[in-house]
């Protein structure tokens, strides 16, 4: 069995996309995954599986969630060791950029091609800048960026299927589950 972390996109946003963490756990277990745990109510899940293919894991989860909820729930997964490395890299990047107001990590379903990486990393302004590393795109936001802005660097549309978490959550999940 291998431990994986999953991140669900676009849930618990308004009245029509509700998916409480107890239901996420129930549906994930019913889909055949073991030792299922959740963290806060934003679609963070840990589970064990014998499946090796990330695509198959994500497809299995997405089908189970859609059948239970009646709407699509994109799932982005990482093996625990992959996520631990991603989190360590995020902490190092944060340490290399002191004084940030916020550091969001977009978790990507697929790696971006070189042209798209260049376009994402060209999103630089007084608000901050983007850095792409593997299946993570980091929004490094400076003091004074418009607090509360969903995508202050206007990069999300370039990332494909992705969901973001702040550095605090990424660090906590790595410490708790990896």
Image (tube, helix red, strand yellow):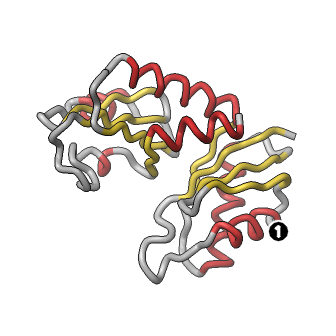
Image coordinates for residue 140, horizontal then vertical, percent: 30, 33
Residue at point 54%, 76% (across, down):
18
Residue at point 64%, 40% (across, down):
78
Image coordinates for residue 49, horizontal then vertical, percent: 82, 47
Badge 1: residue crowd in 10 Å (few <14, some 14–19, many ≥20): few
Q: Is residue 121 above or below residue 64?
A: above
Question: Residue 145 lies in what quarter of the image?
Answer: top left
Q: Is residue 101 left or right of residue 87?
A: left
Look at the image and tell me in which quarter the N terminus lies.
top right
Image coordinates for residue 168, horizontal then vertical, percent: 48, 40
Image coordinates for residue 12, horizontal then vertical, percent: 49, 71
Disc 1: which residue: 30
Q: Is residue 132 above or below residue 32?
A: above
Question: Residue 41 lies in what quarter of the image?
Answer: bottom right
Helix, strand or loop at disc 1? helix
Q: Is residue 124 left or right of residue 95?
A: left
Q: Is residue 29 above or below residue 51?
A: below
């Amino acid at each position: 069995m291998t431990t994986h972390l999953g991140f669900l996109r676009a849930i618990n946003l308004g009245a029509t996309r509700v998916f409480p963490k107890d239901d996420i756990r129930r549906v994930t277990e019913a889909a055949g995954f073991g030792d299922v745990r959740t963290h806060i109510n934003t679609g963070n899940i840990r589970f064990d599986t014998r499946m090796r293919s990330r695509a198959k894991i994500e497809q299995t989860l997405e089908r189970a969630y859609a059948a239970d909820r009646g709407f699509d729930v994109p799932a982005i997964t990482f093996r625990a060791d992959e996520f631990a490395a991603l989190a360590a890299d995020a902490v190092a990047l944060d340490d290399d950029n002191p004084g940030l107001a916020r550091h969001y990590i977009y978790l990507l379903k697929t790696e971006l091609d070189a042209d798209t990486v260049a376009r994402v990393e060209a999103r630089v302004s007084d608000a901050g800048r983007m850095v792409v590393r593997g299946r993570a795109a980091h929004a490094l936001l400076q003091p004074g960026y418009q607090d509360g802005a969903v995508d202050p660097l206007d990069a999300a549309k370039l990332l494909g299927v992705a969901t973001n978490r702040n550095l605090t959550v990424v660090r906590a999940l790595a410490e708790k589950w990896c």
